[in-house]
Amino acid sequence: MESIIQGLKVERQQLIHALKTAQAADHAQILEKKLELDTAIQWLEQIDLLQLHPPKDYIFAKLPETKNAFSEYKIVETLESDDPRDWQELKLTHEGEELWLYTGDWVLKSKK
């Protein structure tokens, strides 16, 4: 993945150079390509960092609308019990802050 990321970064530098030398009329188109490359590079770096498999190895599920606008979703460990009283909530955190799951968030599940 690193060679692809580096190739995109080279292309990004070429676009930056083009922005400095191009006619003003071409700036919007060049800038749009640069921003698309920035996004692609960020995604690929995150995929590489997390060591994710190819997309075909995952199921992507978008959380549906909740019945109440103030509801959120929780992830629980069932502890091999069908009784919700036995379940324990999993607290998700990122950089020390608790993450809450809401309508429209995505869940990524490995098929492996």
Image: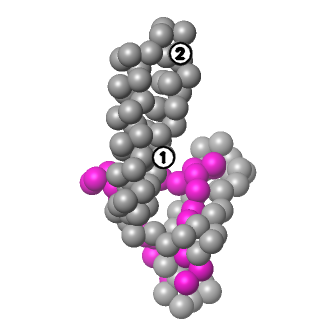
Segment tinted magenta in the rendering:
86-112
Residue at which label 2 appears: 26
Amino acid type, callout 1: Ala
Q: Which quadrant of the rendered structure holds the N terminus?
A: bottom left
Image vertical order of residue 48 relative to residue 76, above or below: above
Label 1 crowd bin: few (<14), some (14–19), many (20+), radius 10 Å: some
The quarter in which the C terminus is drawn is bottom right
The residue drawn where x is 35% and y is 35% is 13
Q: How many marks?
A: 2
Which of the 4 image quarters holds residue 61? bottom right
**For the residue labelled by badge 1, is the local secondary structure a helix, a strand or a loop?**
helix
Residue 67, x across and y down, in percent: 72, 51
Q: Inspect the magenta stretch and tell me whether residue 88 lies in it.
A: yes
In magenta segment, residue 58: no
Residue 81, located in which quarter of the rendered image?
A: bottom right
On residue 40, which mark appears? 1
Asked whether 76 or 94 is in front, the reply is 94
Q: CA distance from mark 1 to mark 2?
A: 22 Å
Instruction: Spot the residue most to the left.
Output: 96
Which residue occupies 42% across, 56% down?
4
